[in-house]
Image (cartoon, rainbow, N blue to C red):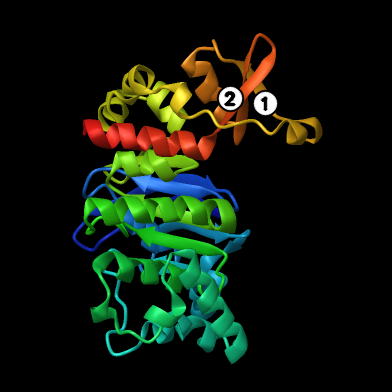
Amino acid sequence: MIKFENVSKRYPDGTVAVDSLELEIQQGEFFVIVGPSGCGKTTTLKLINRLIPLSDGTILINGRKISEYDIHELRWNIGYVLQQIALFPHMTIEENIAIVPEMKRWGRGKVKTRIHELMNMVGLDYETYANRKPSELSGGQQQRVGVIRALAADPEIVLMDEPFSALDPISREKLQDDMLDFKENLKKTTVFVTHDMNEALKLADRICIMKNGKIVQIGTPHELVTNPADDFVKEFVGNKYEKWTSDIKLDDLLQPVNKDEMLITSFATVPVSAPLREILEILSEHEQLVMEKDGNPIGYIDRKSVMKYLSTILEKGV
């Protein structure tokens, strides 16, 4: 879907912001880039939609070099969410969301239907909020509008540059939960930049950890927590696995099993006595997992609820 081939970005003063990146982001993947300030993560993001020109190498989208796309064609198919939100203050919320669909010449009825759908998705009642100006919304509400504006024209790719870092903890958690819903329901190819490892672990399918413009390790949250590539990754991720194993209580996560559904659906199963490491490993491959005791199902757990639960544990301890 998005492929980096030996991509570098150098500035005239000699600064190397991105150094020989080789990576591939799959279609529908939620890919998080994380690392300390100045590691090159935002530069990497901006190279994708040509906000910053690359110095060396090639970036391809669907097998085609980004330099071969008309710049408007490229950007219209890429939603972009900034930390600064950047809503147009003189426009209503409805007008802000409608900008790209109208530029793409969608019919008015289609635009209005899309706005209704997206506002409802993030809990903003259309009748209440559509005609308000951005200044009449809270920071969290404005950022929700920023997110759905990026999704309005149904882009194939969404880029998000530390979109929640300026928000208060409650608004941030709500928007992270919204992102988990978007991830599950919309399945957009998303590249999400953050400096917050807990946020990365909560949201990502895979995480890319960067340092000094280079990739240090790419892996699933489970892989990074249980098998860090070096001391930098281990320190950056923190002692998450021990915290997970000591604090997680499976009884808190068990949901009732629908036995009729089990007759027609194939579920992964595991004994309730299985080690937590094994359970997490299976959940890295399956969305749901049925827990058994004495050969009988006693409930199931799913990946989304586990990641939300673990994120809550980590927030309490950080």
Residue displayed at 23% across by 63% down:
12
Residue displayed at 50% across by 40% down:
304
Give the CA distance from mark 2 to mark 1. Answer: 8 Å
Name the foreground residue: 98 vs 28: 98
* Residue type at the position of mark 2: Ile
Question: Is residue 79 depicted above or below 298 in this figure?
Answer: below
Badge 1 density bin: few <14, some 14–19, many ≥20, Cα 10 Å: some
Question: Is residue 95 depicted above or below 56 in this figure?
Answer: below
Marks 2 and 1: CB-CB under 8 Å?
A: yes
Say which of marks 2 and 1 sits in front: 1
Q: Which quarter of the rendering shows the C terminus? A: top left
Task: Residue at the far right: name it.
Answer: 264
Position of 308 with respect to 232 (left or right) is right
Residue 282's label in the rendered image is 2
Q: Secondary structure at mark 2?
A: helix
Q: Earlier in the sequence, mark 2 or mark 1?
A: 1
Provide residue 37's location: percent of width, then percent of height: 21, 48
Residue displayed at 48% across by 30% down:
253
Name the foreground residue: 239 vs 75: 239
Q: Is residue 277 visible?
A: yes
Provide residue 97's location: percent of width, then percent of height: 44, 79
Provide residue 76's location: percent of width, then percent of height: 51, 76
Name the foreground residue: 61 vs 185: 185
Residue 268's label in the rendered image is 1
* Residue type at the position of mark 1: Ala
Q: Quadrant of residue 247?
A: top left
Q: Is residue 220 visible?
A: no
